[in-house]
Image: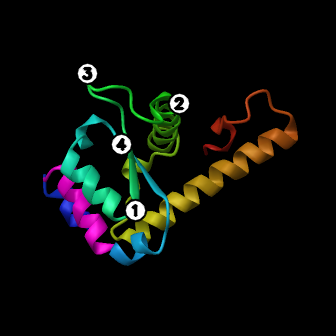
């Protein structure tokens, strides 16, 4: 699955491959909501997803009428971008050093837990900025 993402194939092909690899996982869960950008706008793809019980939430194209759930989408996307920015910037996850999926997962978990512990500690100390980790950067 990870090899597919690095092989410069399209996002739709990566999604299709992921759904194929994890077909049992998808089938075991009802009501999956997939949030995407306009790049996933395709009637055949939406039909394929609906057949698997997956609802696609994406922005409407220019000449399309507003889609169900679209007003909520902007807020959710901003939250996702904020989290991604924190993971990349403050936690330096682009330089994680993991060589396997498990290694990457462990490093991500370590950094998120360290950040959560720092925020908790700053909160207990009454620090004016709880998300600042500068005091722990030695």
Q: Nearer the viewer, residue 87 or 24?
A: 24
Which residue carries the number 1 mark?
53
Secondary structure at numbered mark 2: helix
Which residue carries the number 4 mark?
36
* Pointers 2 and 4 in contact (C-beta within 8 Å): no
- At a point 39% along the width and 58% down the height, the residue shown is 54
- At a point 49% along the width and 27% down the height, the residue shown is 71
Q: Is residue 132 left or right of residue 61?
A: right
Q: Is residue 78 left or right of residue 37?
A: right
* Pointers 2 and 1 in contact (C-beta within 8 Å): no
> x%, y% of residue 30?
49, 66
Single out the mark in the foreground, 4 or 1.
1
Q: Nearer the N terminus, badge 4 or badge 1? A: 4
Q: CA distance from mark 1 to mark 3?
A: 27 Å
Q: CA distance from mark 3 to mark 4?
A: 16 Å
> Does the magenta segment cover residue 78?
no
Neighbour tally class for label 1: few under 14, some 14-19, many 20 plus, Cα within 10 Å: some
* Pointers 3 and 4 in contact (C-beta within 8 Å): no
Which residue carries the number 3 mark?
62
Secondary structure at numbered mark 4: loop
> x%, y% of residue 34?
40, 51
State the quadrant of the C terminus: top right
Q: Nearer the viewer, residue 99 or 38?
A: 38
Neighbour tally class for label 4: few under 14, some 14-19, many 20 plus, Cα within 10 Å: some
Q: Which residues are magenta?
A: 9-22
Single out the mark in the foreground, 2 or 3.
3
State the quadrant of the N terminus: bottom left
């Amino acid at each position: 699955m990870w090899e597919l993402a690095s092989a410069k194939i399209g996002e739709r092909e990566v999604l299709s491959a992921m759904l194929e690899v994890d077909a049992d996982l998808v089938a075991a869960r009802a009501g999956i909501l997939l949030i995407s950008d306009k790049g996933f706008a395709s009637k055949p793809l939406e039909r394929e997803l609906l057949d698997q019980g997956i609802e696609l939430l994406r922005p409407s194209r220019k000449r399309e009428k507003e889609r169900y759930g679209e007003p909520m989408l902007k807020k959710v996307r901003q939250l996702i971008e904020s989290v991604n920015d924190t993971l990349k910037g403050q936690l330096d996850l682009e330089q994680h050093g993991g060589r396997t999926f498990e290694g990457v997962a462990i490093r991500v978990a370590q950094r998120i837990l360290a950040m959560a512990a720092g925020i908790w500690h700053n909160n207990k100390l009454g620090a004016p900025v709880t998300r600042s980790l500068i005091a722990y950067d030695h």
